[in-house]
Amino acid sequence: MDRRKLIAFFAMVLGMFMSILDIQIVSASLSEIQAGLSAGSDEIGWVQTSYLIAEVIMIPLSGTLARIISTRYLFAASAAGFTIASALCATATNIDQMIVYRAIQGFIGGGMIPSVFAAAFTIFPPSKRAIVSPIIGLIATLAPTIGPTVGGYLSHAFSWHWLFLVNIVPGIIVTIVAWNFIDFDKPELSLFKKFDWWGLFSMGVFLGALEYVLEEGNSNDWFNDHLIVIGAIASAVGAMVFFYRAFTVEFPVVDLTAFANRNFALGSIFSFVMGIGLYGLTYIYPVYLSRVRDYDSLMIGETMFVSGLAMFFTAPIAGKLSTIMDLRAMMVLGFVSFGAGTYIMTGITVDWDFYELFIPQILRGFGLMMCMVPINNIALGTLPPARIRGASGLFNLTRNLGGAVGLAIISTVLSNRQDVHYERLREHLDWGNPTAVDQLNSMTSNLNAAGLDGATGAIRQMVNLVTQQAVVMSFSDVFLILTVLFGLMVLGVAMIEKPSPQITGRSGGGH
C-alpha cells in the first residue's frame, strides 16, 4: 500500500472526525455558551441549527465540487476554512456573530465528510475494505457519541471557548497534510462553465428550509407558526425545482442516478434509519439525565461514554466479521442489538442512572458498528469509482436527514405524550383515591412540622411528582417506537440482494 495515500487518508479521517464532532460537542454545553453570550433561551438552539442547516447543503454538493476542483483542493480548502471558522466562533461576543460563524463552520466542514467515504472506496482495493470501512464507520459514529463527553469536559475544565479552540492545531495539521499528500484525482475546471447555479440555489432552499422546519417545528408548535409554514412551502417548491433540474440539465449539481443501483438505494434507507438511531439516542439520553436526574454536562458526558467505548471495541470485530459473514446477517445482528437496547429502556423509571443505562448503551454501541460497516459496504461497494464521489455525498446526507427527522419526531412525541400521560395521571388523583389522599396527608404533616404552609406545599409537590412521572412515561413511549422501527429494519434486510464477494473484500489481495 502506498504510504503517501495512507498518510493522506488518515489526515482526511481526522478532518472528518473534527467536522462531525463539532455537531455534538456543543450540545452538552449550550447553557455555558448561552450565559457567555448573554443569549435568550429561544436563540441558543441556533448555535446547533445554523451549523446543521449549512452542513446539510454542503454534503451533497461536495461530490460535484471535488470533480471540478479535485479532492485535494476541496479538502485542503475545507480544512483551512473550518479551522478559521472555529477560531472565529471562539472570538464571538454575541449570539448573532456566533450563529453566522457556526453556519460558516458547518458549511465548510461539510465538504470534508463525504470526501473520506469517496476516497476510501476509490484508493483502496476491495481486499482492504475490511480494515478501512470499520475505521470510517467508527469515526462517523463515535464522533457524535463522544461529542457531549468531550464538550462537557472542555467547558468544565476551561471555558466554552475551548470547544472551538481545540480544533485549531489539528485543523492546521490536516490542512498542510491534505495539501501535500492528497493526489487521487485531477481537477476538471471545464465543468465549471456547465455548473447548474439554479440547481444549487433550489437545493439550498429545499434542504435548508427542510432542516429548519424539522429543527424548530416542535418548539414553535409546527404548522400553527407562520414561519414553519413558509419554511415548509419553500422546501417543497425548492424540492420540485431541484429534482426537475437534477434530471434535465447536462451537469446537475448532485448526481441522483446512483439511486438506480438497488443496493445503494436500500443502503441509503438503512443509513437514514441509522441516523435516527445515532443522533436520536445521542439526544434522548442527555435530555433524560438532565431533566429527570438533574445531571450536569460533565456527569452526562461520563454516562454517555459507555456507548463510545462499546463502539471502539466493536469496530475491529465488525471489520473481521465483514470478511467472513454475509453482510445482511451482520445488519440483522446490529438492528436486533439496537432494538434490544431500546426495548430494555421502555422499562425506564425516575430512578434510572448509570448502571441501569449501562447495558442499553453497550447494545447501542455494538449495534451501531455492526450496522455501519455492512451498510457502507453495501451502499458504496458496488458503484463504479467515477460515481462514488457524488454518491457518497448523498449517502452521508441520508444519515444526517435521518438524524434531523428522528430528533423532530422524538421531541414532538416527548412533549405530546407528556401532556397525555399528565392528564391520565391527574384523573386518578382525586379525593376518592385513598393512596393519593394518604400521600398528600403525610406530605402536609411533614411540611407543617418543618414550619411551612403544608397544604399548599403538598399540592405543589404532588404536581411535581405527577409531571415527573409523565415525563418518564413519555420517554418510555419514544423507546417503544424506536424498538418497533429497528424491528422493521430487521425485516427490511431481506430486500437486499446478496452482495457479491467482491464487496465483502474476498477478492483483490484475498485473505
Image: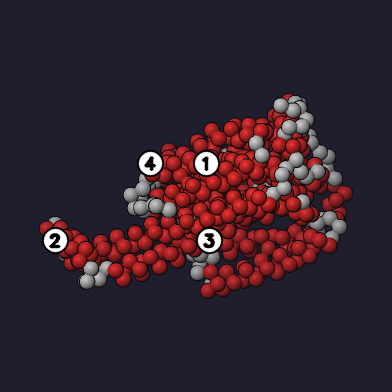
- Identified by mark 3, the residue type is Ile
**Residue of label 3:** 409
The total number of labels drawn is 4
Could you tell which of marks 2 and 3 lies nearer the N-terminus? 3
Nearer the viewer's eye, disc 1 or disc 2? 1
- Identified by mark 1, the residue type is Gly
Q: Position of residue 436 (x, y in %)?
A: 23, 64
Q: Residue at x 58, y 35 (%)?
A: 315
**Residue of label 2:** 445
- Identified by mark 4, the residue type is Tyr
Could you tell which of marks 1 and 4 lies nearer the N-terminus? 4
Nearer the viewer's eye, disc 4 or disc 2? 4
Q: Position of residue 280 (x, y in %)?
A: 52, 52
- Identified by mark 2, the residue type is Ser
Q: Is residue 32 in view?
A: no
Could you tell which of marks 1 and 3 lies nearer the N-terminus? 1
- Is residue 174 depicted above or below 278 in this figure? above
**Residue of label 4:** 355
Could you tell which of marks 4 and 3 lies nearer the N-terminus? 4
